[in-house]
Amino acid sequence: MADDKDVLRDVWFGRIPSCFTLNQDEVTEREAEPYYLLLPRVSYLTLVTDKVKKHFHKAMRAEDVEEMWFEYEGTPLKWHNPIGVLFDLHASSSVLPWSITVHFKNFPDRDLLHCPSSSVIEAHFMSGIKEADALKHKSHVVNDMQKKDHKQLWMGLQNDKFDQFWAINRKLMEYSSEDGGFRYIPFRIYQTTSDRPFIQKLFRPTSPEGSAHTLGDLLKEMCPTALPPDGRQISDHNLSEKSRRSKRTTCGRCRLAMGGANRQKTMQVSRSATRW
Amino acid sequence: MSCALDERDFRRCCRLLLRRSKQLRDGWSWEPVQGSEEGYLRKTAVRSVFLDPEGSGSDSEPRASGPSGPGQQEEEEEAADTDRRVIEDEDEDEDEGVCGVSAGSSQVLQYEYHILHSCSYAAPVLYFRAFTQGGSVRISAKKRQEAPKILPADEGRSLSLEAMWSSVHPNYRLRLQSSPLNTISLQEHPLLGQPFFMLHPCRTEEVMRPVLQAAHEQHRPVNYVLSWLSAVGPVVGLDVPLKYSTLLSPAASPGSSSDTD
């Protein structure tokens, strides 16, 4: 895993330049300038946008402000998906910076989960970690950890501390072939073409004959319509350039390349022909 | 012995439950996912609910103490504090249109329950949501020194998380109070993509192990989904009539190869 450290760092420190603009219909007391921010791919919108909130609050009266939510080209953005997934799913073919519209009224509670505090984000994040470990190690590793280890994982994410995060995460990512590696590989495939939020099923790291499964094998089984018929290579937008070279490697190594996703790996698979 | 329920056994248990539900007119239906064998059980119910945000209820349940060791107590209190802050932080402007109804009032709500299968936990999971039929269900607890007010809302307004917690019967409050976000929380429905409340499945094994163990020892069949539902359903107002079990219906226990369909 040491040789993958570069890849882990690349994934962790991935950033998306973004521009936050206040929705035109919001009632303001002053002109509200757009706010620019580099968003971490592995984090969550509501965790990293306190400054955005403060910036726009300054231009508004308290009574005109309710829970903040974000929208891109008419689509409410689901804060509970990692930022990288949201970008890849909705905006990866648009010009940078990613233009996000900020709202403080008319929260769409049929589409979005409420996010009243960071405890909610923490609970959601930890819930993903636990579910991933249920798949990898029947929950043994995460349950054997102390509460302070769980806290360290969260603090590492919240404060953008790679070493702090990975000091604990490496235990959750331990893949020993003698022990059978991971029981199942935690993954989620997001597509814009489906009502279903994501595809998540049981998938073993190796075939019954013992050969390691590749990313291509996973997609072939879970999402065959997404694969190009002429055998062109799959482009995975959650991987940095370096790790893209390793996309043909086995799923066991793939989860290392997917780094920060010690929770579910998230792969955005696009139906758009230009993507390939 | 294994407490795992795989997808196939889940569907088998659901079919048996469904059959019984039809006989009893209990209202469950199977909602398939287009183009696959996957699906979920669904039921709606109208329920009159007592919303009691203060948590005192009608009996004098002690707050968040529970069966914990000396070290754990502190952690639970800490978690409880964190979660209290969650409630306080929300809805800073909810004083608008306060109708002055005191906390602890009855509401009639339209509930919708879904039972899905979690492949990660090899267990059933309960998702649910509730809507008003006119009247209000948002609870503002911003000013803690005042009694939380029940605010007017539009018809068909969905229940807030705080209101949902406050509707849980005092008998089930213990775990909820010590760590509400790990018991009932707002989640995205994995098939529909809409916000639903979810009862966390990570403790299902704790609930089911004694049931499965006893049944195994006594050579009794067990319908995993039915037994699980009868244990967790009441926490969120879903009662399972005893009549489900009084007929000797053939059931699917984990690992059993019987299929009487």
Image: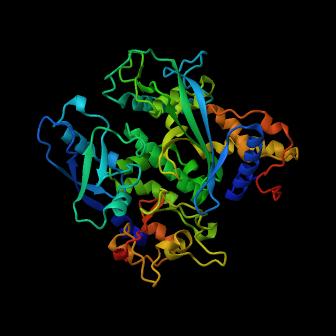
| Closest to the observer, A134 or A84 | A84
Residue depicted at x 46% and y 30%? B162
Residue depicted at x 57% and y 18%? B57
Percent x, y for residue B175?
58, 32
> Looking at the picture, does residue B170 appear above or below residue A133?
above
> Looking at the picture, does residue B129 appear above or below residue A40?
above
Can residue B226 be seen here? The reply is yes
Quarter of image, res A244: bottom left
| Closest to the observer, B129 or B173 | B129
Residue depicted at x 51% and y 31%? B164
Quarter of image, res B37: bottom right
Can residue B5 be seen here? The reply is no
| Closest to the observer, B217 or B23 | B23
Residue depicted at x 42% and y 80%? A233
Percent x, y for residue B48?
58, 24
> Looking at the picture, does residue B230 appear above or below residue B58?
below
> Looking at the picture, does residue A266 appear above or below residue A24?
below
Percent x, y for residue B183?
55, 38
Percent x, y for residue B135?
45, 24
